[in-house]
Amino acid sequence: MGIYVIAPPIILAVLAFIPAAVIGLASRAARRADWLEEQAAAEAAEASQAEDAA
């Protein structure tokens, strides 16, 4: 009878929580990559302005 208590939470975790966590981590990595790209572009623009001023 214990299988009826233990199995549903395990199935729920496999079908819902694990894919949601993977999608969340992938989304976070993509947002961080976009942010880093923006930071690099901003630094390049700043360096270009400093070079033009000199």
Image (cartoon, helix red, strand yellow):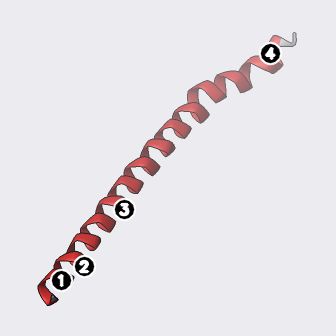
Q: Which residue is mark 1?
A: 49
Most foreground residue, 25 or 33? 33
- Does the CB distance between marks 4 and 2 fall below 8 Å? no
Most foreground residue, 35 or 1? 35
Q: Position of residue 25 (x, y in %)?
A: 50, 43
Point out the frontmost of discs 3 and 4: 3
Mark 4 packing: few (<14 Cα in 10 Å), some, or many (20+)?
few
Disc on res. 6: none
Q: What's the residue type where badge 3 is placed?
A: Trp
Q: Which residue is mark 3?
A: 35
At 24% from the left and 79% from the top, the residue drawn is 46
Disc on res. 46: 2
Q: Which residue is mark 4?
A: 4
Q: CA distance from mark 1 to mark 3?
A: 21 Å
Marked residue nearer the N-terminal end (1 or 3): 3
Q: What's the residue type where badge 2 is placed?
A: Glu
> What kind of element bears circle 1?
helix
Q: Position of residue 41 (x, y in %)?
A: 24, 67
